[in-house]
């Protein structure tokens, strides 16, 4: 197991706070525009997993601990493939796009759970990320089932991002206290 440097901890804390802000803006935007402007909602849906990819790549750069690097690389590939899948379906079959987002949320949640557990050994205080991984996994299942049955729409995904933002805020606060 490698150790986490204070600079890496600070970088991770800053990433968590940035993710909190962007996810809240995304959630408000998707809730506000998805119904009135489906094209804008579709674009926001494509951008969400790409935002996660950008955050994962930044995380890899600032916190390169080997224990979770492979998991984070898998997450980056998964997010990229998800954005492509959503892009291919969102304009013709929005329900499939929601289900694709759900598959991504489920798998990304499992990966986040693994990273949270590994980082807990390294940093401590990762319970918010562990809970976020569990919540994302459960939400992903609901999005797949709800999307395929037509019960969930793009605007309904905003709540998911709000919960994620709360978890990242708590994680950032816990890392701040650790510093």
Image: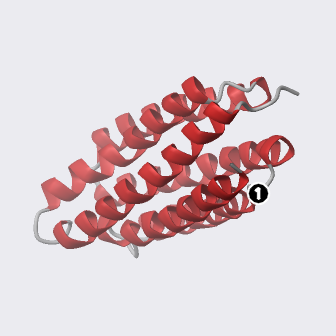
* Residue ID at (74%, 49%): 116
Whether residue 39 can be seen here: yes
* Residue ID at (23%, 64%): 29
Q: Quadrant of residue 32?
A: bottom left
Q: Is residue 145 above or below residue 52?
A: below
Q: Position of residue 28 (x, y in %)?
A: 28, 69
Near-viewer residue (146 or 76): 76
Q: Quadrant of residue 30?
A: bottom left
* Residue ID at (38%, 58%): 21
SS for tag 1? loop
Q: Report whether 158 appears left or right of 125.
A: left
Instruction: Identify the residue at the far left of this view.
Output: 37
The residue at which mark 1 appears reads as 125
Q: Position of residue 39 (x, y in %)?
A: 14, 54
Q: Report whether 13 appears left or right of 151.
A: right
Whether residue 92 can be seen here: no
Q: Quadrant of residue 26?
A: bottom left
Near-viewer residue (109 or 142): 109
Q: Position of residue 120 (x, y in %)?
A: 81, 49
Q: 10 Å neighbourhood of mark 1: few (<14), some, or many (≥20)?
A: many
Q: Position of residue 172 (x, y in %)?
A: 58, 56
Name the quadrant of the N terminus.
top right
Q: Report whether 33 appears left or right of 177.
A: left
């Amino acid at each position: 197991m490698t150790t986490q440097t204070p600079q890496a901890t600070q970088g991770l804390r800053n990433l968590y706070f940035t993710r909190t802000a962007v996810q809240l803006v995304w959630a408000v935007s998707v809730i506000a525009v998805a119904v009135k402007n489906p094209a804008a909602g579709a674009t926001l849906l494509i951008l969400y997993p790409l935002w996660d990819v950008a955050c994962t790549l930044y995380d890899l750069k600032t916190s390169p601990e080997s224990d979770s690097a492979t998991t984070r690389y898998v997450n980056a590939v998964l997010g990229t493939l998800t954005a492509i899948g959503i892009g291919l379906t969102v304009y013709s079959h929005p329900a499939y796009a929601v289900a694709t987002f759900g598959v991504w949320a489920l798998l990304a949640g499992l990966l986040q759970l693994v990273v949270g557990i590994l980082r807990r050994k390294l940093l401590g205080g990762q319970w918010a990320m562990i809970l976020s991984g569990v919540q994302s996994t459960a939400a992903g299942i609901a999005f797949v089932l709800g999307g395929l049955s037509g019960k969930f729409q793009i605007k309904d995904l905003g709540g998911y991002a709000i919960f994620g933002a709360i978890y990242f805020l708590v994680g950032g606060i816990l890392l701040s206290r650790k510093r």
